[in-house]
Structures are given as C-alpha cells and as structure tokens.
Image (spheres, rainbow, N blue to C red):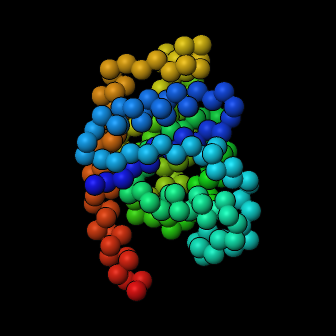
Amino acid sequence: MVKLQIILGSTRPGRAGETVAKWVYKMASKRDDIEFELVDVANYELPLLDEPMPPMMRKYTKGHTKKWSEKIEGADGYIFVAAEYNHSLAGGLKNAIDYLNHEWRNKSVGFVSYGSNGGSRAVEHLRGIAGELHLADVREQLLLYLANDFENHSKFIPTEAHEIQLNKVIDEIVEWAEAMQAVRNKEAVATY
C-alpha cells in the first residue's frame, strides 16, 4: 500500500494551513487504497539548518535531524500544504526540506496551497526545489484563495469542488509513487 504524508509547512502561530491540512487528511482518510499520515513541520522544532555536513552526505549529527529524516524516509509520496508568503513558500517548510536529500529522492509530491493568489507562486518555487531533489511533482494541484475559500482570511471553508480537485491531486501522486517505486528499488540494488 502506498504511504503518503501530508506535510503542513507553515510554522506560524495562528496559521490558516492547519485547518487546510486537517481537511486534506480527513478527505484522504476516506480512501482505502492509501495510507495517510499528517506531519506538522512545527512539531519537529527544526532550527535554521545546523548540520555541519551537506544533507547529500547523510552524516547527520543532530537528534532533530535524525528524527526528521526517519519520518520523511518512511513515505512513498507527499502532499505539501503550502502557504504563500511574500510570493514564495514559508521559510519553515523550505528549511525542513533543506535538511534532507536522499529521503526525498525518487518519490512523488503534490501541492495544496493557499494565499492571496491561491499559493501559486509558492508552488512554482516548490516545483523547482522538487526537481533538484528528484521528487516527481504532479501536474494537478489545489489552489485555495484567502479571499474566496476562507472566512476572515483564516478559517478554510471547503466545498465539493475542492474535494474533487484534491482527489485528482491524490490520484496523480499515487500513480507516480507507484511508478517511482521501481526506480527506488533499482537504485537500492545499485548501491549494494
């Protein structure tokens, strides 16, 4: 069974993304073909990247890095719930991504984003990051607009259309996660 993690990327107190991530998890949990887990970056209390060696070396010295690595390693794909801050992604999410390298490699990723422009610019930056990390980013995405999809710009008000689009995102992530499994297996054999 494919294991997907829903990664809540904003660490800001009062973040709108928490209601979004919980809704994504609730909708995803209706499916019986996939295993889902909600992962909140804020719970890992990652300081600004503080490992002395580049993540590509995989020589982690800090307990928080090892804990984060173990969590991310266990998934076949990801849904990033991404806020758009200043035409880009939230710093907490970028920092959490930068801590690791191999753990992301040859897996799939999709995006549920929110902001004044639906979070589209955050996703644009995340796609470039995904490419560098060998993450297969899917085409479908769910954009949520603070003015239209949230009450008082903070409480997410989901609709049936949101659920339909979310399922398209999940379907593509699963397809790519299954396809990338063969690549990961081939890579694992090559390293032994």
Q: Residue at x 67, y 45 (%)?
A: 91
From the top left corner, tell me how far across and down residue 117 is, in percent.
54, 27
Find the residue positioned furthest to the top. 152
Tell whether 33 sits left or right of 4. Answer: left
Quarter of the image for the N terminus: give it.
bottom left
Q: Residue at x 56, y 62 (%)?
A: 69
From the top left corner, tell me how far across and down residue 53 is, in percent.
69, 73
From the top left corner, tell me how far across and down residue 20 is, in percent.
49, 29
Residue 3 vertical placement versus 29 (above, below):
below
Q: Residue at x 38, y 57 (%)?
A: 76
From the top left corner, tell me how far across and down residue 191 is, in percent.
42, 83
Can residue 89 be seen here? The reply is no
Can residue 54 be seen here? The reply is yes
Residue 18 vertical placement versus 154 (above, below):
below
Name the one closer to the observer, 188 or 119.
188
Q: Residue at x 32, y 20 (%)?
A: 160
